[in-house]
Amino acid sequence: MTVDVFLSVGRTSTDDQERLVASLEATLRSLEVAPRTVGRNDFSSKAPLKRIEEVLGECHGTVVLAFERSWAPSVTSRRGSVDQALLSEVRLPTVWNQIEAALSYGKGLPLLVIVETGLLPEGLLEARYDWYVQTIPMDVTALQTNEFRAVLADWIRQVEAHASRPAARASAEPDVSTMSLAQLAQSLTVAQAWSVLGAVATVLIAVAAVAYKLGGA
């Protein structure tokens, strides 16, 4: 069965970028994983952030593919502070990589983070969080290395485990038809128990009223 995953990737600007994205999509589909990207293969009349939230809710993992979107010959970091530094040849990805990675992490989705060599390492694209960041050149052959395939296989296992959780929760639900009264009572929350007691009391009062009327007749 095909499993949906979210692919966080910006709009491609060069042939190399498009070839890499298309190759990654093909690789995922060959593993029965369907990549979904808002604005690339998933379209909606809703605001982008709203649609991203909806799609993430239907996915079981996220791939973040970050490549150059903006370039500057030099940038001053922390200008005016004692830590001021001049950075040269600064390359930045689309900010949506950061947004979608954060949303995915918040939802507990397994993350596969792939970053083009030379991008400024910051935010959730840094290799210091709960996931491994792969740095690769903008070349389709980078998806064929042993390292990439090993990391991808491990991520696929996490995606499959995430996809199986709803079924596991469903199978773990107790079958009330086979439970004793004591077991059923123990499984109720306080609010549920009071609701049951209230319903029972209402029934008893109604029965007593009927009995009184019959007795009086």
Image: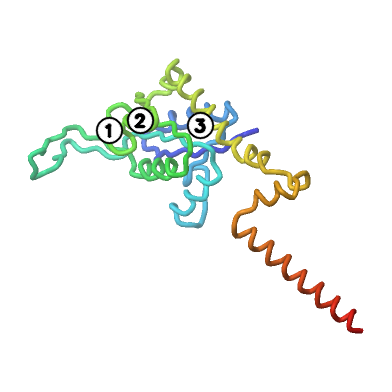
Residue situated furthest front in the rendering: 215
Q: Residue at x 36, y 24 (%)?
A: 136
Question: For mark 3, what is the residue?
Answer: 25
Left or right, 203 with respect to 29, comes to right
Query: Measured along the vertical axis of the image, is residue 213 above or below residue 43?
Result: below
Circle 3 SS class: helix
Marks 2/1 in contact by CB < 8 Å: the verdict is yes
Helix, strand or loop for disc 2:
strand
Which quadrant: the C terminus?
bottom right
51 left or right, relative to 88: right
Q: How many marks?
A: 3
Q: Nearer the viewer, mark 3 or mark 2?
A: 2
Residue pushed farthest bottom? 217
- Local packing at callout 1 (Cα closer than 10 Å; few below 14, some 14-19, many 20+) is some
> Of callouts 3 and 1, which one flags the residue occurring earlier in the amino acid sequence?
3
Judging depth in this view, the residue of 14 and 196 nearest the camera is 196
The amino acid type found where label 1 is placed reads Pro
Precedes in sequence: disc 3 or disc 2? 3
Q: Nearer the viewer, mark 3 or mark 1?
A: 1
2 relative to 57, above or below:
above
Disc 3 marks a residue whose amino acid type is Glu
Q: Amino acid at mark 2?
A: Val
- The image position of residue 211, as x and y in percent, is 86, 76
In the picture of the structure, the residue carrying the numbered disc 2 is 115
Residue 84 image-quadrant placement: top left
